[in-house]
Amino acid sequence: MCSLVPAALLVGALLCLASSSSPAVATRSPGRTFNVLSFGAAADGVTDDSEALVAAWQVACRVPHATVLLPLGHRFLVSPVTLQGPCNTKLALQIDGTMLAPPEMGSWPKPRRPLQWLNFKWLQGFSIQGAGAVDGQSSSLQSASPATTSQRSAGHWQASGAKPTLIRFYNSFNVSVRGIRITNSPQCHLKFDSSGGIKVKNITISSPGDSRNTDGIHLQNTRDVEIRSTSIGCGDDCVSIQTGCSNIHMKNIICNPGHGISCSVGGLGKDNSLACVSDVVAESISVQNALYGVRIKTWQGGVGSVRNITFSNVRVSNVATPIIIDQFYCDRGGARCANRTGAVAISGVTYRRVVGTYSFQPVRLACSDARPCTGVSMVDVRLSPASAPEGPLRGGLCWNTYGEARGTMEPLGTGCLQRSNGYAMPLIQPFNYTC
């Protein structure tokens, strides 16, 4: 039997690996399970268990089909860590207990570093799974007393102007996340960057509806993604898709509350940058108590393209604007963004069977004068006012949006698309980019 102390965690772990009777190694066909309790984790929700987690990871990383286990009935406080590969095949992190992020701002990385709590890098064939929870504990800051809030407002987050992402994957492939609950992130809950072959299934993400910039799932420079049977509630986009993403498939997603399912969110084309998003399908989507239903937004002045986007079988309930394209996006609050002639080209967007209730405007398609939206299709869109709208309702808007509306269109004016001779209107500006 191996007894481990913090000063010799890794050495002890290696010795335990060689011992078939060690409690640190529970035999599981075809691989082995490494319980962080056997690597010195206190699991009391107060003591920092980062060292035990890293020690278990380092040993499991070298074993084929290994599992790092955070067992049921325990709470693990973990400081920001990077768990990286390359590792042996089929490595898994089994979260059956609760992982807790430090609630104090001073525990997070400094502003000059990438801000994330659990940072996974350079992994192949890795999975996070289990019936446990990952809790960012950011709600403790919101519910703090006025005196405590005042003290903290002068601290790390306010000074840096940035907040940390809870779980981030970088340059990782064939990754799956399933079963777990992710709650109370200071910023994005689950982020994939420069990755591919991603599968997210049966997870729950939740943060208060008034928590700022708390995207549920955030994709950037990531391809071949499948998100299924997942419930997301947050203070920003339930799913946000940034530049460099393609072949994204979402199905059976519940968004309540949030800013909806957003393609090309916010950052596309900012500061005249290149933005490319293609081949996105979102089907069987439910959006409730949200600002938007399904949205595409880009900055003026950008270049690139958003193409082949399909939203089908979308049900909305008490959503301010269920269908929106905004090529004049600006997030500077009271400051107005300067008008630019360039725009990210948007083409081949389909809205099929979008039904439910709205509280402000059923459809808003505001496209660029220089680069109109083309090939937009609306089929069977039935939207009615919510029972208790918060203010005056507006009619549908289509500005420089070309395509075709078919089937039922409610209310009148929803199918306001302009027709053109051919699939695409001539563009004022030439294409000078490559996606």
Image: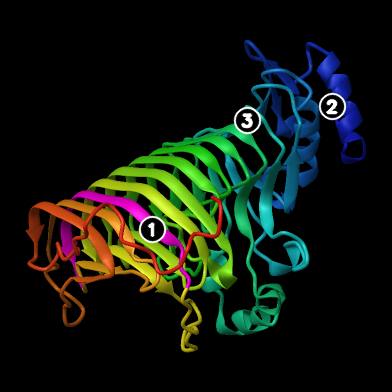
Name which residue type carries label 2. Answer: Ala
The tag earlier along the polypeptide, 1 or 3, is: 3
Q: Nearer the viewer, mark 2 or mark 1?
A: 1
Disc 1, SS = strand
Query: Is 386 displayed left or right of 183 in the figure?
Result: left
Q: Residue at x 75, y 62 (%)?
A: 109
Checking the image for residue 126, the label placed there is 3
Neighbourhood count class around disc 1 (C-alpha, 10 Å): few under 14, some 14–19, many 20 upward? many
Q: Nearer the viewer, mark 1 or mark 3?
A: 1
Q: CA distance from mark 2 to mark 1?
A: 54 Å
Q: Residue at x 34, y 66 (%)?
A: 372
Disc 2, SS = helix
Point out residue 395 in the picture as x, y percentages from the top left corner.
Answer: 15, 74
Q: Residue at x 66, y 26 (%)?
A: 91
Name which residue type carries label 1. Answer: Ile
Q: CA distance from mark 1 to mark 3?
A: 35 Å
Query: Is 182 displayed left or right of 85 in the figure?
Result: left
Q: Residue 136 occupies which quadrant of the picture?
A: bottom right
Is residue 194 shown in magenta?
no
Point out residue 192 in the picture as x, y percentages from the top left corner.
Answer: 58, 46
- Tell me where the magenta segment starts and ends, as one range: 342-359
Disc 3, SS = loop
The tag earlier along the polypeptide, 2 or 1, is: 2
Name which residue type carries label 3. Answer: Phe
Residue 1 visible: no
